[in-house]
Image (cartoon, rainbow, N blue to C red):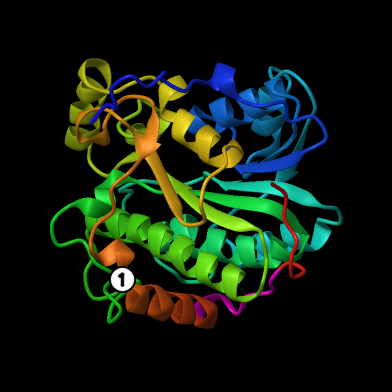
Amino acid sequence: MSTPNRTPWTAADLPPLTGRTVIVTGATSGLGTVTARELARAGAHVVLAVRDTARGRDVASTLPGSTEVRRLDLSSLASVRAFADAWDRPLDVLVNNAGIMAVPEARSADGFEMQLATNHLGPFALTNLLLPHITDRIVTVASNAHRRPGVDIDFDDIGSERSYSPWRAYQQSKLANLLFTRELQKRLTAAGSRVTAHAAHPGYAATSLQGRTAGAGQRLMMAVANRLVAQPDTMGALPSLYAATQSLPGDSYTGPDGRGELRGHPAPARRSEYALDDARARRLWNLSEELTGVRFAPPQAGSGQR
């Protein structure tokens, strides 16, 4: 619910970011483009990490400030490793924004269910491979869909090999985002690092994401809902921008402040009981390390900016 007597936070409230470097994944459309644009406008050097570099260059040409484009396909561990191997300078903020939603069943180049690969395993690997360079924070974009009744991590069939439901796989991957953030923060703290991990969700924002869901009927319904219910992507990006720039405790979760966290300005968001379960977070982390072959490599103890 909205907080009374509080001035709503907007992109105009971003602090000066001159001299800071930020990676935004999935920056060629929707929330990613808005996030990249506003961070660049505030003075950050923004790296658009995208699958389609030609499209990325087109988007970058419309953005203010300092930008560059690098190729990254989060569904491919080889691409993730190549991106991380090529990174050779300090990185202030990583925004794990890219994602897919409720798509038809498909497998990644590594044989993983595509939503698990793109929404969780890719960002998991990317974050850990870049951690030695990160100086401030990691922001991972989750979803309030993780709070739907019965949504949990199916550790016995995390790759949906026995059965596949587009929405169940999506909801599971979004719960994974929050469990990843929780366990990452615990590991950063234990390592003595001041780098922090945060999550954010956009509420119900009108983006191109809804146009890629499985089923023509679902796409039609979501197109109607985009017109009648959804807030614009400029509002949906605010929680990510807030989490990327404001003074927040580690493992914070930011979403819209309106009813049902569907619309509004940035405020603390609610998590499901499962998203707060440390045992689930540790188990998912260990499984993710096993599946990706990537392990926690903390920044230098005491590193980080405040």
Q: Where is residue 139 in the image (x, y as percent from the top left)?
A: 54, 48
Q: Residues within 10 Å of mark 1 (few under 14, many from 20)?
A: few
Highlighted magenta segment, given as a residue range: 291-298
Could you tell me which residue is drawn at 40 percent across and 28 percent down?
207
Residue identifier under label 1: 277
Q: Can residue 141 be seen in this view?
A: no
Q: Is residue 2 left or right of residue 236?
A: left
- Residue at left offset 57%, top offset 30%: 35
Residue 198, x across and y down, in percent: 50, 51
Q: Does 15 sit above or below residue 168?
A: above
**Quadrant of the snapshot with the N terminus:** top left
Q: Residue at x 39, y 73 (%)?
A: 281
Image coordinates for residue 274, horizontal then vertical, percent: 26, 66
* Residue 282: percent from left, percent from top: 42, 78
Q: Which quarter of the picture shows residue 257? A: top left
Which amino acid is tagged 1?
Answer: Asp
Main secondary structure found in the magenta portion: loop
Left/right placement of residue 34 relative to residue 107 reads right
Question: How many marks overall?
Answer: 1
Residue 58 image-quadrant placement: top right
Q: Is residue 292 magenta?
A: yes
- Secondary structure state at the residue bearing disc 1: loop
In this picture, residue 298 sits left or right of residue 153: right
Q: In the rendered image, which quarter is residue 236 located in?
A: top left
In front: 262, or 114?
A: 262
Residue 297 is covered by the magenta coloring = yes
Direction from residue 36 to residue 200 in the image, left or right: left
The outermost residue toward the front is 5
